[in-house]
Structure formats: structure tokens, C-alpha cells
């Protein structure tokens, strides 16, 4: 085990949050098409709210579309931060096992880690699949000799949040501070230390995203009015036919 150099972690975050998070978000927005955006929104819900504003409809659809994949993209970035931290301390590496994200050894223990964003990431079926992945990985290691003489520890890891019931019977669930401590060699403040570098150039990036969103909002609203409005009001029948009618 090597001591964690926080300056290296800060540098990694600042150099990668742009291309791995902000740039991907921008690319998603720039690639949006009006037809795709409209088909993703529930027109029945919007109609039930009693609005006939094309601007409000498009803004609602656009906001929901932009935010839908935001947590997934950011979660993937945080996963890469965690792998970098663990690699620096334990020589950890991205797992090649289905359903797992990180593997590392500490003494006679081999850790198999599945990294999630927060503690409420999945339903009972998804958690069952996670347990099945852990069991399959342990069985594979046992038959292949990949962990001879080692105690295998499976970890459901969450980058943020709290779950004080750590022992789940089949595996450990480590959230927030507990997870960052595990992969950093016991650094109790790492979960707080990474907050500052995560905000690197956030204002500049968000200003850029806001400008692109405003452009899309104006272009989409004009096109929507032309196609789905009569005398300035939404033609709901025409809209629902486009959204839900048979091709």
C-alpha cells in the first residue's frame, strides 16, 4: 500500500471532469433533435396541467431530456476517480468481470467492488442481480485459482450517501465516507477533499451549457409552433398522434 497523494487526485479530477462530464453533456445537447425530444415526453401529463404554451412545453421536455442522463454520466466519471484513487494506493484496476467495476488486494483480502452513485441506486431485482454477479465472480476465482489463499470480500460501493447497515450477509455495503476510506487506505477526509476540485471551471462550463440550451429552446420552440400549433395554441390531437400513433 502506498500513501495517497491528494495533489494527484486533485489534478486527475481537474484534468478529466471537462472531457468526461461537461463535454459529454454538451455533446448530448448539441445532438438533440426535436422529434426525438417530443417522443420522450408524456403529452398527457402536460395536457393535464392545463398549459397551452409551446415555450413551456418545449422547455419542460428539453430540461427533462438534458437531466435524464446527467447522473449516469457523472457517476461514470466518479467511478473513474475512485479507480484512480485505488490504483494509486493499492494498485487497483478496473474489473473485467460482468457487473463489477474495481478489483484490488490488501494483504490476504481480495476486494471485488461494484460502484454505484448513491445508496438507493436499484430495486430488489437489480440488487439480486448484483448478488448473483458477486457469487459468480467468487465461483470463477475459486475454480480458476485466481485467489488462492485469499479471503474474497464483495463490496456494493456508493460514492455518496449513508447506509449504516454495512453487513448485508452476502456482501458489504459501503457508502460515502466509508467507501472512499476503503479505497484510499483509510483517508477519513477524502470524501470531503474531492468536493473542491469537482467544481473546477464549473461556472464557465455551465454558462456554455446554458447558452447552448437557450439556442436549442428557441429553435425547437419555433419549429414546434410551426408544426403543432394552430393560432398560437397547441393542437393536442396532432401532437398525440405524432407522439403515440402507430407508424
Image (cartoon, rainbow, N blue to C red):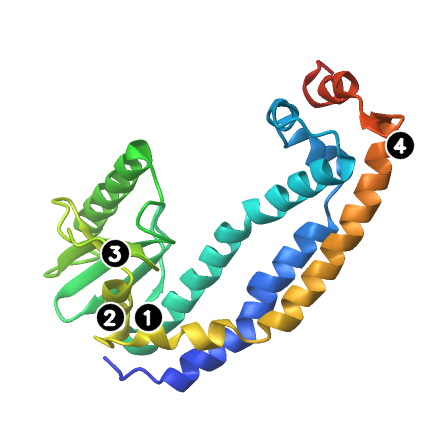
CB within 8 Å, label 2 to label 4: no
CA separation in Å, label 3 and label 1: 12 Å
CA separation in Å, label 1 and label 2: 8 Å
Q: Residue at left 34%, top 40%? A: 122
Tag shown at residue 181: 2
Q: Nearer the viewer, residue 243 or 210?
A: 210
Q: Residue 35: horizontal and vertical position, in percent?
A: 75, 33
Q: Nearer the viewer, residue 109 or 62?
A: 62
Q: Residue at left 24%, top 70%? A: 181
Q: Mark 4 or mark 2, which is nearer the start of the sequence?
A: 2
| Quadrant of the rendering where the C terminus is positioned | top right
Q: Which residue is mark 1?
A: 191
CB within 8 Å, label 2 to label 3: no
Left or right side of 122 for 162: left
Q: Mark 3 or mark 4, which is nearer the start of the sequence?
A: 3
Q: Residue 15: horizontal and vertical position, in percent?
A: 55, 76
Is 75 rendered above or below residue 217?
Answer: below
Tag shown at residue 162: 3
Q: Residue at left 48%, top 71%? A: 198
Q: Residues within 10 Å of mark 4 (few under 14, many from 20)?
A: few
Observer-side mark, 1 or 4, equals 4
Q: Residues within 10 Å of mark 1 (few under 14, many from 20)?
A: some
Q: Residue at left 75%, top 57%? A: 212
Is 84 rendered above or below residue 214?
Answer: below
CB within 8 Å, label 4 to label 3: no
Amino acid at each position: 500500500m502506498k500513501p495517497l497523494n491528494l495533489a494527484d487526485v486533485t489534478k486527475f479530477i481537474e484534468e478529466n471532469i471537462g472531457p468526461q462530464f461537461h463535454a459529454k453533456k454538451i455533446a448530448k445537447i448539441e445532438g438533440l433533435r426535436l422529434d426525438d425530444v417530443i417522443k420522450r415526453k408524456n403529452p398527457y401529463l402536460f395536457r393535464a396541467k392545463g398549459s397551452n404554451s409551446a415555450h413551456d412545453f418545449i422547455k419542460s421536455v428539453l430540461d427533462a431530456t438534458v437531466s435524464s442522463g446527467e447522473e449516469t454520466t457523472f457517476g461514470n466519471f466518479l467511478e473513474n476517480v475512485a479507480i484512480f484513487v485505488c490504483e494509486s494506493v493499492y494498485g487497483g484496476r478496473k474489473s473485467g468481470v460482468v457487473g463489477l467495476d474495481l478489483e484490488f488486494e490488501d494483504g490476504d483480502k481480495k476486494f471485488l467492488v461494484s460502484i454505484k452513485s448513491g445508496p438507493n441506486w436499484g430495486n430488489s431485482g437489480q440488487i439480486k442481480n448484483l448478488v448473483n454477479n458477486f457469487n459468480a465472480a467468487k465461483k470463477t476465482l475459486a475454480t480458476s485459482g485466481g485467489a488462492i489463499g485469499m479471503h474474497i470480500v464483495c463490496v456494493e460501493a456508493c460514492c455518496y450517501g449513508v447506509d449504516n447497515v454495512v453487513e448485508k450477509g452476502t456482501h458489504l455495503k459501503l457508502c460515502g465516507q466509508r467507501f472512499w476510506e476503503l479505497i484510499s487506505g483509510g483517508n477519513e477526509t477524502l470524501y470531503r477533499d474531492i468536493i473542491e476540485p469537482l467544481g473546477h471551471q464549473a461556472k464557465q462550463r455551465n454558462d456554455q451549457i446554458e447558452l447552448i440550451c437557450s439556442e436549442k429552446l428557441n429553435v425547437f420552440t419555433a419549429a414546434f409552433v410551426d408544426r403543432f400549433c394552430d393560432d398560437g395554441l397547441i393542437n393536442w390531437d396532432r401532437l398525440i398522434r405524432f407522439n403515440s400513433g402507430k407508424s
